[in-house]
Image (cartoon, helix red, strand yellow):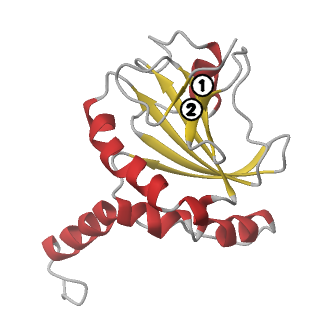
Amino acid sequence: MEPIKARRLGRESTDGVYYFDFSSGYWVMMEESASPLIPKERYSLVYFDNTLCPVCRRYDLHWYPFVESNLERLRGFGLYVVLCDWFTQQCTSAKGAMTFIEYKVRASPTTMLMLSDGSKVIYTERYEGLLTERDLNNIVFTFPERAERAARGEKVERPLTEEEMIERLSKTLAQGGAGAKP
């Protein structure tokens, strides 16, 4: 039987774990099993999506254009979408549900970057909520260098999203600015 595939996934898509096939340009459903996704690629970008999530539908407006406009730069990454109707509570895909559980995803959308040795994930970065294309550009293409440093035991900090930067700036301003005296 031919696997399910689509140019883009959304509200009407079948629950499952999909990988991006660079040769065809389609998202292709992985074979169903009761085991979570463990990417084979060294670097992976994974979007945890719920079909019933309105913010996920807004995130799609950033995610898919980002992927489509950066195909050449993303060739070193495994690209995945883990899709359920609503987390593990409403998911017809055992692989999808197990992947949500394995990576403790409790917010959607969640975007994870993963460093894998092919049999296990050894480093991750998690971003919960809507990311812009600018956020994705900022975090994705600098990930390999951060991940390799982390794998060597070096301390690394993940980049802030635009929203996180605004929150920090607002908090600083509310406290009277960075240089304010108590």
Question: Residue 131 location in percent, x, y?
Answer: 36, 54
Q: Position of residue 85 (x, y in %)?
A: 41, 17
Up-down relation of residue 67 to residue 16 (above or below): below
Residue 82 falls in which quadrant of the image?
top right
Q: Amino acid at mark 2?
A: Lys
Screen quadrant of the N terminus: top right
Residue 73 is tagged as: none
* Extreme residue in the front direction: 24
Measuring from the top left, give residue 9's x and y in whole percent.
Answer: 43, 31
- Tell me which residue sits at (73%, 15%) in the image: 33
Which residue corresponds to mark 2?
104
Could you classify mark 2 by the number of other residues whose Cα lies within 10 Å: few (under 14), some (14-19), or many (20 or more)? few
Question: Residue at point 58% right, 71% down?
Answer: 142
Three-letter code, disc 1: Ile
Is there CB contact under 8 Å for labels 2 and 1?
yes
Is residue 38 found left or right of 124 in the rendered image? right
> Looking at the image, which is closer to me, 65 or 32?
65
Tell me the residue that label 1 is attached to.
101
Determine the secondary structure under disc 2: loop
- Label 1 secondary element: helix
Q: Residue at x 36, y 66 (%)?
A: 134
Query: What's the distance in space between the residues labelled 2 and 1, CA to CA?
Result: 5 Å
Quadrant position of residue 18: top right
